[in-house]
Image (cartoon, rainbow, N blue to C red):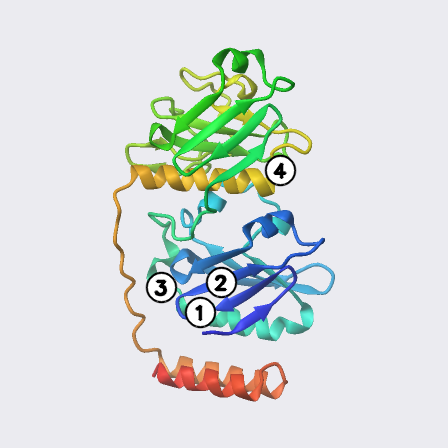
Amino acid sequence: MGDVLAGIHATWEFDTDSVLIRFERGIRTPRLFQSLRERRVPHAALSSVTLTPGKRGTVVLRAVPRPGADPLLEAAAGQLKDGCDPYRLVLPAERETLAEYYADELRALLGPEAGEPADRFLVAAPEAPMRFKAYDGRASFDGDRISFRWFWTGASSEKWKAGDQTFPVTELSGVEWRSPEAFEGYLRLVPRGLESMAPPAGASAAVPGAGLLTSAAPSTQPLAGRPTRADQDPAAVIFGLGYGPVHESLPFAAAVLESVRRKHSTPVVAALAGAGRRDPADIAERIRHLGELHQAGLVTDEEFSAKKAQLLAEL
Protein backbone atom coordinates (compact mmCIF):
# COMPACT_ATOMS: atom_id res chain seq x y z
CA MET A 1 0.00 0.00 0.00
CA GLY A 2 2.84 2.37 0.83
CA ASP A 3 0.61 4.96 2.55
CA VAL A 4 1.25 6.59 5.93
CA LEU A 5 -1.30 7.41 8.60
CA ALA A 6 -0.01 9.60 11.45
CA GLY A 7 -1.78 9.54 14.80
CA ILE A 8 -1.08 10.50 18.39
CA HIS A 9 2.07 8.76 19.67
CA ALA A 10 2.49 6.59 16.54
CA THR A 11 2.55 6.45 12.74
CA TRP A 12 1.38 3.50 10.68
CA GLU A 13 3.05 2.80 7.34
CA PHE A 14 1.04 0.42 5.16
CA ASP A 15 3.10 -1.99 3.04
CA THR A 16 1.94 -4.74 0.71
CA ASP A 17 2.31 -7.49 3.31
CA SER A 18 2.56 -5.72 6.66
CA VAL A 19 2.02 -2.59 8.73
CA LEU A 20 5.09 -0.84 10.11
CA ILE A 21 4.24 0.90 13.38
CA ARG A 22 6.66 3.65 14.35
CA PHE A 23 6.26 5.07 17.83
CA GLU A 24 6.90 8.75 18.43
CA ARG A 25 9.24 10.03 21.09
CA GLY A 26 8.03 12.63 23.51
CA ILE A 27 7.26 13.36 27.11
CA ARG A 28 3.63 12.25 26.68
CA THR A 29 4.38 9.08 24.74
CA PRO A 30 4.05 5.94 26.92
CA ARG A 31 7.50 4.68 27.86
CA LEU A 32 6.66 1.22 26.55
CA PHE A 33 6.19 2.71 23.07
CA GLN A 34 9.50 4.53 23.33
CA SER A 35 11.18 1.29 24.36
CA LEU A 36 9.69 -0.65 21.43
CA ARG A 37 10.51 2.16 18.94
CA GLU A 38 8.94 0.36 15.97
CA ARG A 39 7.24 -2.93 15.16
CA ARG A 40 6.47 -4.61 11.84
CA VAL A 41 3.18 -6.49 11.96
CA PRO A 42 2.52 -8.87 9.03
CA HIS A 43 -1.07 -8.99 7.78
CA ALA A 44 -0.96 -12.72 8.57
CA ALA A 45 -0.62 -11.81 12.28
CA LEU A 46 -3.96 -9.95 12.37
CA SER A 47 -7.42 -11.30 13.09
CA SER A 48 -9.48 -8.13 12.56
CA VAL A 49 -9.44 -4.32 12.45
CA THR A 50 -11.73 -2.06 14.47
CA LEU A 51 -12.53 1.66 14.52
CA THR A 52 -14.18 3.04 17.65
CA PRO A 53 -14.79 6.44 19.28
CA GLY A 54 -12.01 7.54 21.63
CA LYS A 55 -11.77 10.08 24.41
CA ARG A 56 -11.89 13.85 24.02
CA GLY A 57 -12.61 14.15 20.31
CA THR A 58 -10.60 11.19 19.02
CA VAL A 59 -11.17 7.90 17.23
CA VAL A 60 -9.16 4.72 17.76
CA LEU A 61 -8.03 2.50 14.90
CA ARG A 62 -6.95 -0.87 16.26
CA ALA A 63 -5.41 -3.84 14.53
CA VAL A 64 -6.39 -6.93 16.53
CA PRO A 65 -3.63 -9.57 16.53
CA ARG A 66 -4.36 -13.28 16.32
CA PRO A 67 -3.87 -15.16 19.61
CA GLY A 68 -0.34 -16.51 19.71
CA ALA A 69 1.01 -14.20 16.99
CA ASP A 70 2.84 -11.63 19.14
CA PRO A 71 5.19 -12.64 21.98
CA LEU A 72 4.75 -9.24 23.64
CA LEU A 73 0.99 -9.65 24.02
CA GLU A 74 1.37 -13.31 24.95
CA ALA A 75 3.69 -12.34 27.79
CA ALA A 76 1.38 -9.49 28.85
CA ALA A 77 -1.63 -11.85 28.89
CA GLY A 78 -4.21 -9.08 28.96
CA GLN A 79 -2.52 -6.93 31.63
CA LEU A 80 -1.67 -3.95 29.42
CA LYS A 81 -3.78 -0.83 29.86
CA ASP A 82 -5.42 0.62 26.76
CA GLY A 83 -3.00 3.53 26.70
CA CYS A 84 -0.07 1.11 26.39
CA ASP A 85 -1.61 -1.10 23.72
CA PRO A 86 0.84 -0.96 20.77
CA TYR A 87 -1.93 -1.93 18.33
CA ARG A 88 -4.04 1.19 18.97
CA LEU A 89 -3.67 4.28 16.78
CA VAL A 90 -5.41 7.31 18.27
CA LEU A 91 -6.48 9.96 15.74
CA PRO A 92 -8.35 13.29 15.85
CA ALA A 93 -12.06 12.74 15.24
CA GLU A 94 -11.95 14.79 12.01
CA ARG A 95 -9.80 12.05 10.47
CA GLU A 96 -12.41 9.35 11.08
CA THR A 97 -13.30 9.04 7.38
CA LEU A 98 -9.66 8.51 6.46
CA ALA A 99 -9.22 6.01 9.29
CA GLU A 100 -12.30 4.12 8.11
CA TYR A 101 -10.81 3.90 4.63
CA TYR A 102 -7.58 2.35 5.92
CA ALA A 103 -9.51 0.02 8.20
CA ASP A 104 -11.43 -1.28 5.17
CA GLU A 105 -8.20 -1.65 3.22
CA LEU A 106 -6.60 -3.71 5.99
CA ARG A 107 -9.68 -5.91 6.44
CA ALA A 108 -9.61 -6.73 2.74
CA LEU A 109 -6.04 -8.03 3.09
CA LEU A 110 -6.74 -10.48 5.92
CA GLY A 111 -6.61 -14.11 4.89
CA PRO A 112 -8.79 -17.10 5.85
CA GLU A 113 -6.43 -17.91 8.74
CA ALA A 114 -7.35 -14.63 10.49
CA GLY A 115 -9.97 -16.36 12.62
CA GLU A 116 -7.56 -19.00 13.91
CA PRO A 117 -4.88 -18.81 16.62
CA ALA A 118 -1.34 -18.57 15.23
CA ASP A 119 0.81 -21.69 15.59
CA ARG A 120 3.98 -19.60 15.85
CA PHE A 121 5.04 -16.05 16.57
CA LEU A 122 4.60 -13.83 13.52
CA VAL A 123 5.68 -10.53 15.09
CA ALA A 124 9.33 -10.19 16.09
CA ALA A 125 10.17 -10.05 19.79
CA PRO A 126 12.37 -7.31 21.26
CA GLU A 127 16.01 -8.20 20.71
CA ALA A 128 18.56 -9.30 23.31
CA PRO A 129 20.79 -8.40 25.08
CA MET A 130 18.42 -6.93 27.63
CA ARG A 131 18.55 -6.12 31.34
CA PHE A 132 16.56 -4.40 34.03
CA LYS A 133 16.73 -3.75 37.75
CA ALA A 134 14.15 -5.52 39.91
CA TYR A 135 13.60 -4.89 43.60
CA ASP A 136 15.65 -7.88 44.76
CA GLY A 137 18.15 -8.28 41.93
CA ARG A 138 19.32 -7.46 38.44
CA ALA A 139 18.00 -9.53 35.54
CA SER A 140 19.89 -9.90 32.25
CA PHE A 141 19.31 -11.89 29.07
CA ASP A 142 21.89 -12.41 26.34
CA GLY A 143 19.69 -14.42 23.99
CA ASP A 144 20.75 -17.80 25.37
CA ARG A 145 20.83 -17.37 29.15
CA ILE A 146 18.91 -15.47 31.78
CA SER A 147 20.88 -14.37 34.84
CA PHE A 148 19.69 -13.08 38.21
CA ARG A 149 22.17 -11.26 40.46
CA TRP A 150 20.75 -10.61 43.94
CA PHE A 151 20.83 -7.31 45.85
CA TRP A 152 21.64 -7.68 49.51
CA THR A 153 19.17 -4.92 50.35
CA GLY A 154 16.16 -6.61 48.72
CA ALA A 155 16.71 -10.35 48.18
CA SER A 156 15.19 -12.84 50.60
CA SER A 157 17.31 -15.21 52.67
CA GLU A 158 16.13 -18.08 50.46
CA LYS A 159 17.61 -16.38 47.40
CA TRP A 160 20.84 -15.53 49.18
CA LYS A 161 21.24 -19.17 50.22
CA ALA A 162 20.64 -20.30 46.63
CA GLY A 163 23.13 -17.76 45.26
CA ASP A 164 23.10 -15.90 41.95
CA GLN A 165 21.28 -17.83 39.24
CA THR A 166 21.80 -18.54 35.54
CA PHE A 167 19.18 -20.32 33.43
CA PRO A 168 19.90 -21.55 29.89
CA VAL A 169 16.85 -21.05 27.67
CA THR A 170 17.00 -24.72 26.69
CA GLU A 171 16.25 -25.66 30.31
CA LEU A 172 13.12 -23.51 30.54
CA SER A 173 9.55 -24.22 29.54
CA GLY A 174 8.15 -20.73 30.00
CA VAL A 175 8.02 -17.38 31.75
CA GLU A 176 5.39 -15.70 33.91
CA TRP A 177 5.04 -11.91 34.02
CA ARG A 178 2.83 -10.14 36.52
CA SER A 179 2.64 -6.42 35.85
CA PRO A 180 4.50 -4.12 38.27
CA GLU A 181 1.34 -2.00 38.20
CA ALA A 182 -0.48 -4.85 39.97
CA PHE A 183 -0.03 -6.04 43.53
CA GLU A 184 3.13 -8.14 44.03
CA GLY A 185 4.37 -8.00 40.45
CA TYR A 186 7.20 -10.25 39.32
CA LEU A 187 8.97 -12.02 36.47
CA ARG A 188 9.24 -15.74 37.08
CA LEU A 189 10.95 -18.39 34.97
CA VAL A 190 9.54 -21.89 34.71
CA PRO A 191 12.27 -24.57 34.55
CA ARG A 192 11.42 -27.65 32.55
CA GLY A 193 9.84 -30.36 34.65
CA LEU A 194 8.39 -27.86 37.13
CA GLU A 195 5.40 -26.71 35.09
CA SER A 196 2.02 -26.18 36.69
CA MET A 197 -0.24 -29.16 36.18
CA ALA A 198 -3.22 -26.84 35.70
CA PRO A 199 -2.34 -23.36 34.42
CA PRO A 200 -5.13 -20.77 34.53
CA ALA A 201 -7.51 -21.02 31.60
CA GLY A 202 -6.81 -18.46 28.92
CA ALA A 203 -3.57 -17.29 30.56
CA SER A 204 -1.05 -19.59 28.96
CA ALA A 205 0.31 -20.64 25.61
CA ALA A 206 1.60 -24.15 25.25
CA VAL A 207 4.23 -25.73 23.07
CA PRO A 208 3.86 -29.48 22.52
CA GLY A 209 6.18 -31.24 24.90
CA ALA A 210 7.31 -28.02 26.55
CA GLY A 211 4.55 -27.46 29.10
CA LEU A 212 3.65 -23.99 30.30
CA LEU A 213 4.91 -21.15 28.13
CA THR A 214 3.54 -18.03 29.73
CA SER A 215 1.08 -17.19 32.44
CA ALA A 216 0.36 -13.75 33.82
CA ALA A 217 -1.37 -14.71 37.05
CA PRO A 218 -0.51 -18.24 38.17
CA SER A 219 -2.85 -20.50 40.04
CA THR A 220 -2.97 -20.28 43.81
CA GLN A 221 -1.92 -23.92 43.84
CA PRO A 222 1.86 -24.19 44.36
CA LEU A 223 3.92 -25.68 41.56
CA ALA A 224 5.47 -29.01 42.40
CA GLY A 225 9.03 -28.46 43.63
CA ARG A 226 8.75 -24.64 43.55
CA PRO A 227 8.25 -22.08 46.32
CA THR A 228 4.74 -20.69 46.44
CA ARG A 229 5.90 -17.07 46.67
CA ALA A 230 7.97 -15.33 44.01
CA ASP A 231 10.09 -13.55 46.62
CA GLN A 232 11.34 -16.95 47.81
CA ASP A 233 11.85 -18.47 44.34
CA PRO A 234 15.43 -18.24 42.97
CA ALA A 235 13.88 -18.47 39.48
CA ALA A 236 12.03 -15.17 39.96
CA VAL A 237 12.66 -11.48 40.51
CA ILE A 238 10.07 -9.26 42.15
CA PHE A 239 9.03 -5.73 41.25
CA GLY A 240 8.47 -2.67 43.41
CA LEU A 241 8.02 1.07 43.12
CA GLY A 242 10.44 2.08 40.37
CA TYR A 243 11.74 -1.48 39.95
CA GLY A 244 10.87 -3.65 36.95
CA PRO A 245 8.71 -1.07 35.13
CA VAL A 246 6.51 -2.26 32.28
CA HIS A 247 8.67 -0.73 29.55
CA GLU A 248 11.68 -2.73 30.78
CA SER A 249 10.34 -5.98 32.22
CA LEU A 250 7.64 -6.76 29.63
CA PRO A 251 9.93 -6.60 26.54
CA PHE A 252 12.39 -8.70 28.56
CA ALA A 253 9.69 -11.33 29.25
CA ALA A 254 8.62 -11.30 25.58
CA ALA A 255 12.20 -11.83 24.38
CA VAL A 256 12.66 -14.77 26.77
CA LEU A 257 9.31 -16.25 25.75
CA GLU A 258 10.15 -16.06 22.04
CA SER A 259 13.52 -17.67 22.64
CA VAL A 260 11.97 -20.49 24.69
CA ARG A 261 9.45 -21.24 21.98
CA ARG A 262 12.08 -21.11 19.25
CA LYS A 263 14.37 -23.49 21.13
CA HIS A 264 11.57 -25.98 21.68
CA SER A 265 9.98 -25.82 18.24
CA THR A 266 10.91 -27.41 14.96
CA PRO A 267 11.44 -24.70 12.33
CA VAL A 268 8.49 -24.46 10.01
CA VAL A 269 8.73 -22.87 6.58
CA ALA A 270 5.39 -21.30 5.71
CA ALA A 271 4.41 -19.68 2.43
CA LEU A 272 1.47 -17.32 2.29
CA ALA A 273 -0.87 -18.09 -0.56
CA GLY A 274 -1.58 -15.25 -2.94
CA ALA A 275 -4.82 -13.44 -2.41
CA GLY A 276 -5.75 -13.84 -6.08
CA ARG A 277 -7.86 -11.38 -8.03
CA ARG A 278 -10.23 -9.13 -6.13
CA ASP A 279 -13.95 -8.86 -6.73
CA PRO A 280 -14.56 -6.10 -9.36
CA ALA A 281 -17.50 -4.79 -7.33
CA ASP A 282 -15.23 -4.48 -4.30
CA ILE A 283 -12.62 -2.62 -6.36
CA ALA A 284 -15.28 -0.25 -7.71
CA GLU A 285 -16.54 0.49 -4.19
CA ARG A 286 -13.03 1.25 -2.95
CA ILE A 287 -12.35 3.57 -5.88
CA ARG A 288 -15.62 5.38 -5.12
CA HIS A 289 -14.61 5.72 -1.46
CA LEU A 290 -11.17 6.93 -2.51
CA GLY A 291 -12.81 9.54 -4.74
CA GLU A 292 -14.84 10.85 -1.81
CA LEU A 293 -11.65 11.24 0.22
CA HIS A 294 -10.04 13.05 -2.72
CA GLN A 295 -12.95 15.45 -3.06
CA ALA A 296 -12.88 16.12 0.67
CA GLY A 297 -9.21 17.08 0.43
CA LEU A 298 -8.03 14.19 2.59
CA VAL A 299 -6.08 12.59 -0.26
CA THR A 300 -3.82 14.51 -2.66
CA ASP A 301 -4.02 14.26 -6.45
CA GLU A 302 -0.87 12.15 -6.54
CA GLU A 303 -2.10 9.81 -3.80
CA PHE A 304 -5.47 9.44 -5.55
CA SER A 305 -3.89 8.57 -8.90
CA ALA A 306 -1.40 6.12 -7.41
CA LYS A 307 -3.98 4.33 -5.27
CA LYS A 308 -6.52 4.16 -8.08
CA ALA A 309 -3.90 2.62 -10.39
CA GLN A 310 -2.98 0.11 -7.71
CA LEU A 311 -6.62 -0.92 -7.22
CA LEU A 312 -7.22 -1.27 -10.95
CA ALA A 313 -4.13 -3.46 -11.23
CA GLU A 314 -5.75 -5.93 -8.85
CA LEU A 315 -8.60 -6.67 -11.29
| Residue position for label 4 | 245
Q: Which of 273 and 202 lies nearest the eye of the viewer?
A: 273
| Residue position for label 1 | 15
| Residue position for label 3 | 111
Which residue does the image show at 32% across and 70% down from the upper left? 275
- Real-space CA distance between mark 3 and mark 2, rounded to the nearest whole angstrom: 18 Å
Quadrant location of the C terminus? bottom left
Which residue does the image show at 55% across and 60% down from the upper left? 22
Q: Is residue 198 visible?
A: no
Q: Position of residue 154 (x, y in %)?
A: 63, 20
Circle 3 Cα neighbour tier, 10 Å, few/some/many (<14 / 14–19 / ≥20): some
Q: Earlier in the sequence, mark 2 or mark 4?
A: 2
Q: Which of 173 and 100 lies nearest the eye of the viewer?
A: 173
Q: Earlier in the sequence, mark 3 or mark 1?
A: 1
Which residue does the image show at 59% across and 52% down from the upper left? 33
Tags 1 and 4 touching, CB below 8 Å:
no
Task: Name the element at disc 4.
Answer: loop
Tags 2 and 1 touching, CB below 8 Å:
yes
What's under tag 4, amino acid-wise? Pro
What's under tag 2, amino acid-wise? Leu
Q: Which numbered dot is residue 299?
A: none
Q: Position of residue 72 (x, y in %)?
A: 49, 45
Circle 2 Cα neighbour tier, 10 Å, few/some/many (<14 / 14–19 / ≥20): some
| Residue position for label 2 | 20
